[in-house]
């Protein structure tokens, strides 16, 4: 049997920490002796999260940066790492169709790709070679249970999360020999601004604090895939294992976002 040592983190960078799951993760990691680098685009929301993390004793630095901006992301992450070796980086920022703020389907899908795919890449690319060189560190990528099967309700979103999941799984294999851990996070429904936009019943939806506790435990153990809630994950695995022709009719009955 393999015994996993729970890892402790002192210098943590989280994108999209101004609300929802990212904010809950920042607050869950906040403690004396912990330095947090938190990003988002909304300064007011970001400041609120920073204040609550500081109250918990953490040392907090915020950055208003769009994850789609590769150069700004590179500069922010390498400067943070130069000053305070990052031992955990969480590429969490993401949007759904409803939260992308776009007018047309084309613009919406373009933003989903820029933020959910390029944004994750822009977060991981600056830090992976550094962690690899020093043979330590942990990276976590935010995918979704929506990443296992094409969804007529959200084609670009599901596809963007599939990219994140597969990229993370591959990266884990690349970095494992160098002592760097990689976890892919696949939540079901979690209360946040993304799910607040949904007008349908969401099965097994949980609050972001509970999701954060599950994610923290998984990251500490360097779990390859942190998928929850378990019952929803089991259903997703089963349905995605079937040929699409058998499940198309079922997916056509699911509620749409628009
Ligand atoms: N909620 C769920 O049920 C669920 C399930 C599975 C996966 N997820 C994933 O979890 C992650 C967090 O989402 P959430 O549900 O917590 O939604 P949320 O409350 O809308 O939070 C999204 C976060 O991402 C940030 N963000 C969005 N676009 C950004 C950009 N271009 N640059 C920088 N930051 C950006 C937002 O900050 P600003 O608005 O300040 O930019 C915010 O902090 C997403 O990747 C989402 O796809 C959520």
Image: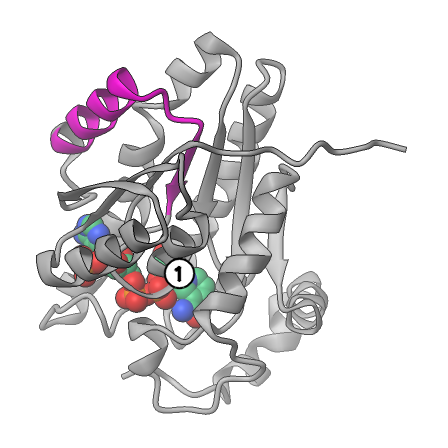
Q: Pick whichever, 59 or 255, lies toward us.
A: 59
Q: Which residues are magenta?
A: 72-91
Q: Label 1 neighbourhood size at 10 Å, few (<14), some (14-19), many (20+)?
A: many
Q: Pick whichever, 107 or 37, lies toward us.
A: 37
Does residue 122 lie above or below 126 as drawn? below
Q: Residue at x 22, y 70 (%)?
A: 99
Query: Going by the image, does 68 lie left or right of 15?
Result: left
Q: Residue at x 47, y 34 (%)?
A: 139
**Within the image, what quadrant is residue 110 found in?**
bottom left
Q: How many marks?
A: 1
Q: Residue at x 12, y 59 (%)?
A: 42
Query: Going by the image, does 83 lie left or right of 208?
Result: left
Mark 1 CB in 8 Å range of ligand 1?
yes
Q: Is residue 78 magenta?
A: yes
* Residue 253 in view here: yes
Furthest-right residue in view? 1
Does residue 248 lie above or below 164 as drawn? below
**Within the image, what quadrant is residue 63 found in?**
top left
Rendered location of residue 23, percent (x, y): 33, 58
Query: Does dot 1 land on a helix, a strand or a loop?
Result: helix
- Quadrant of picture, ligand 1: bottom left
Rendered location of residue 9, percent (x, y): 49, 33
Q: Which residue is mark 1?
A: 24
Q: Residue at x 19, y 61 (%)?
A: 48
Query: Going by the image, does 3 lie left or right of 241?
Result: right
Chief secondary structure of the magenta span?
helix
Does residue 232 lie above or below 7 as drawn? below
């Amino acid at each position: 049997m393999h015994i996993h040592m729970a890892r402790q983190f002192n210098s943590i960078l989280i994108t999209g920490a101004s609300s929802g799951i990212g904010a809950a993760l920042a607050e869950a990691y906040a403690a004396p002796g912990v330095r947090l680098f938190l990003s988002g685009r909304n300064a007011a929301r970001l400041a609120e999260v920073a204040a609550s993390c500081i109250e918990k004793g953490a040392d907090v630095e915020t950055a208003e940066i769009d994850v789609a901006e590769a150069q700004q992301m590179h500069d922010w992450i390498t400067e943070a790492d130069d000053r305070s070796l990052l031992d955990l980086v969480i590429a969490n920022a993401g949007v759904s169709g409803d939260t992308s703020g776009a007018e047309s389907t084309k613009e919406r899908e373009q933003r989903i790709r820029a933020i959910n795919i390029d944004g994750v890449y822009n977060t991981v690319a600056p830090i992976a070679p550094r962690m690899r060189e020093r043979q330590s560190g942990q990276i976590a990528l935010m995918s979704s249970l929506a990443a296992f099967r094409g969804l007529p309700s959200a084609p670009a979103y599901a596809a963007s999360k599939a990219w994140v999941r597969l990229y993370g799984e591959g990266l884990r294999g690349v970095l494992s020999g160098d002592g760097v851990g990689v976890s892919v996070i696949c939540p079901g429904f979690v209360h946040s601004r993304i799910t607040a936009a949904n007008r349908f019943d969401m099965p097994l939806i949980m609050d972001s604090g509970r999701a954060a506790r599950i994610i923290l435990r998984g990251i500490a153990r360097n779990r390859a895939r942190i998928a929850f809630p378990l019952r929803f994950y089991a259903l997703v695995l089963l349905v995605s294992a079937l040929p699409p022709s058998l499940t198309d009719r079922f997916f056509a009955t699911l509620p749409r976002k628009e």
